[in-house]
Amino acid sequence: MADILAENLSGKAVMGSDGTELGMLYNITMDLKTGSLSDLLVTPNEELSPAQVPFDRDESGRFHVPVSNVQAVKDYIVVRT
């Protein structure tokens, strides 16, 4: 995958591999010791039922999508669901 600046990801739509629009990218978490990226924090689409999404949620209701699930970054961030 080509390098992409984080500033270009802010507010990008996140879509499941099945075409479901999950929501908008809020932030990305990382391990401070290793510098490796951990999770995408995704503000959920309001029309989406929580039961449709296999990812954990935080106290703010945002999905924690493991970075290892990212399949593509173009117009959308596509993640394996």
Image: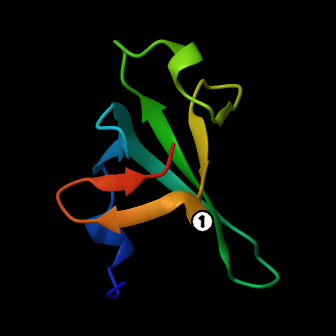
On the image, numbered disc 1 is attached to which residue? 68
Horizontal arrangement in the rendering, residue 55 relative to residue 74 (left or right): right
At which x and y percent is residue 45?
A: 36, 24
The residue positioned 41% from the left and 64% from the top of the image is 71
User: Label 1 is placed on what type of residue?
Assistant: Ser
Q: Considering the numbered disc 1 on the image, is that residue within a helix, a strand or a loop?
A: helix
At which x and y percent is residue 13?
A: 28, 45
In this picture, is 69 found above or below 63?
below
The residue positioned 48% from the left and 12% from the top of the image is 49
Horizontal arrangement in the rendering, residue 10 relative to residue 65 (left or right): left
> In the image as oriented, which residue stretches furthest toward the front?
18
Quarter of the rendering occupied by the N terminus: bottom left
The residue positioned 50% from the left and 53% from the top of the image is 27
**Nearer the observer, 50 or 27:** 50
**Nearer the observer, 19 or 67:** 19
In this picture, is 47 found above or below 35?
above
In which quadrant of the rendered view does residue 54 lie?
A: top right
